[in-house]
Amino acid sequence: DVKVTQSSRYLVKRTGEKVFLECVQDMDHENMFWYRQDPGLGLRLIYFSYDVKMKEKGDIPEGYSVSREKKERFSLILESASTNQTSMYLCASRENSPLHFGNGTRLTVT
Amino acid sequence: EDKVVQSPLSLVVHEGDTVTLNCSYEVTNFRSLLWYKQEKKAPTFLFMLTSSGIEKKSGRLSSILDKKELFSILNITATQTGDSAVYLCAVESYNAGNMLTFGGGTRLMVKP
């Protein structure tokens, strides 16, 4: 069974901090995704990656960057966290299959 | 821009009721429509639909796609409290690589 692991379940950070959200998958999937989920807005795609060192912007990339140095790991970076980035962040991976999600990281920026 | 709209936004029913959740979409080069169930953690996959009129069924849950009218429904019969969750609909298009566009979700609460 596919396992997508996000390093933190809950995070609290201060405005202006640099924040790293880590995601690891164990099924050798080429495609990995970062979404944020907000009430009433559903899941919105921030960035995705279809291969090592390859990345594509999603619908809401502003204020975020990503890193994919190894196939199994996809990191989301908030260069300078702001309160409007308080949200649930979901990582996912797939390979010609439905998305497999991690359990999410609930980030609060104060 | 691809668009997915789910209705209702939220729903409260009693155990044993039957519910129908709706998902309408606008997408270029449609590939598939997917339903997910999300409780407190990760969304879990329910169904993938690619062809019109063919019902997918899993226990008390079933779903069907209408590619002409651009919508899908998810039915849950004899609801149980364990069905309480947010149900997400997503569409995939050939244009967008492997990206999915999600709807806002329907929050279902099943009361005992």
Image (cartoon, rainbow, N blue to C red):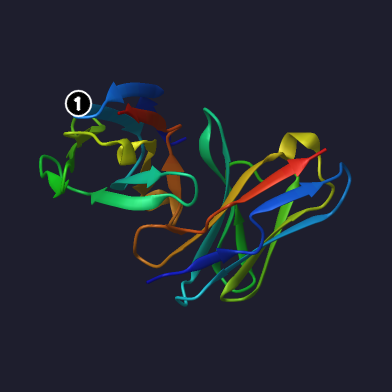
Question: Taking B104 as reference, is B66 left or right?
Answer: left
Residue A14 sits above or below residue A5 on the image: above
- The percent coordinates of residue B53 (x first, y second) are 10, 40
- The percent coordinates of residue B48 (x first, y second) are 26, 51
Q: Residue furthest front?
A: B112
Number of disc labels: 1
- The percent coordinates of residue A55 (x first, y second) are 61, 62
Residue B80 in sight: yes
Question: Taking A16 as reference, is B35 left or right?
Answer: left
Residue B29 sits above or below residue B108 on the image: below
Instruction: Please give the chain letter of the residue carrying mark 1.
Output: B
Q: Residues within 10 Å of mark 1 (few under 14, many from 20)?
A: few
Instruction: Look at 74% across and 42% down and name the residue there.
Output: A108
- The percent coordinates of residue A106 (x first, y second) are 65, 46
Question: Taking B42 as reference, is A37 left or right?
Answer: right
Q: Residue furthest right?
A: A16
Q: What residue is shown with label 1?
A: B17
Residue A59 sits above or below residue A68 on the image: above
Residue B8 in sight: no
In the foreground, A86 or A69: A86
Question: Taking A14 as reference, is B103 left or right?
Answer: left
Can you tell which quarter of the image residue A77 is in? bottom right
Can you tell which quarter of the image residue B72 is in? top left
Give the structural element (helix, strand or loop) at label 1.
loop
Instruction: Look at 52% across and 27% down and name the residue there.
Output: A40
Instruction: Look at 79% across and 35% down and name the residue there.
Output: A83
Q: Quadrant of the C terminus of chain B?
A: top left
Residue type (three-letter) at the residue carrying disc 1:
Asp
In the foreground, A57 or A82: A82
